[in-house]
Image (cartoon, grey):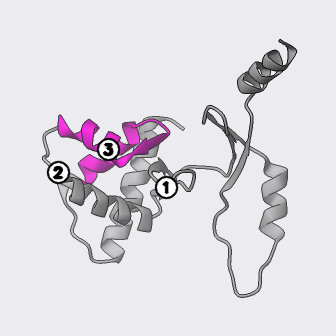
Amino acid sequence: MNEDKRKGLAREALSRYITEHHRRCTPERFALLDKMIEMPARFTIDELCTAISGGEFRVSKATIYNTMRLFADAGIVRKLHLDGSQWEISIDSTPAVRLVCRNCGRVREVRDSQLFNTLRLKRYQSFVIDRFEICASGLCSKCRDKGKRKKQQ
């Protein structure tokens, strides 16, 4: 999905959320949303603060944290559970398994529709699942190859 379409979907979701929950519609929120859409797939609050600091709006770090919470409530972003400090746009995301290298920290996402179809069928007593985040740790091919070379020497 291209950036303009993502931006449009995110702006629409934010407008709908603001209207339904009687929140203030401020230009700063939309400027922050636009800047966030331009960020890499995963980003931190500090990276977002740095990116927005050169713009026309002066926004405090506290405002950015509060706005990110509002965006999360609106379903536009989600906080990743990998290390607790990264965020990602969730407005258009499809479920993926995150493969995290325990040696170098590299993250790769793999789409596995068969796995997610199976998980959708799973039911738990007193709990309704609305989203999946699957994270698997191991060694990426580069780190695995380095380990093999060390053993051979």
Asked if 75 appears above or below 54 in the picture, the reply is: below
Relative image position of residue 43 (x, y in whole percent): 43, 42
Count how many numbered circles sit on residues in the image.
Answer: 3
First reached walking from the N terminus: tag 2 or tag 3: 3
Query: Can you identify the residue that label 1 sits on?
Result: 84
Q: Earlier in the sequence, mark 1 or mark 3?
A: 3
Magenta span of residues = 29-54
- Residue placed at 39% from the left, 57% from the top? 12
Q: Quadrant of the C terminus?
A: top right
Q: Nearer the viewer, residue 128 or 2?
A: 128
Relative depth, front residue between 101 and 1 = 101
Quadrant of residue 111 within the rendered picture: top right
125 on left or right of 48: right
10 Å crowding of disc 3: few (<14), some (14-19), many (20+): few
The location of residue 36, given as percent across then percent down, is: 36, 44
Task: Look at the image and tell me whether residue 139 can be seen.
Answer: yes
- Specify which label sits upstream in the sequence, 1 or 2: 2
Question: Residue under circle 2?
Answer: 59
Amino acid type indicated by mark 2: Val
On residue 98, the disc is: none
Mark 1 packing: few (<14 Cα in 10 Å), some, or many (20+)? few
Name the residue that disc number 3 marks: 46
Whether residue 52 appears in magenta in the rendering, the answer is yes
Name which residue type carries label 3.
Answer: Asp
Task: Tell me the mark number nearer the camera, choosing from 1 and 2.
Answer: 1
Specify the principal SS of the magenta part: helix
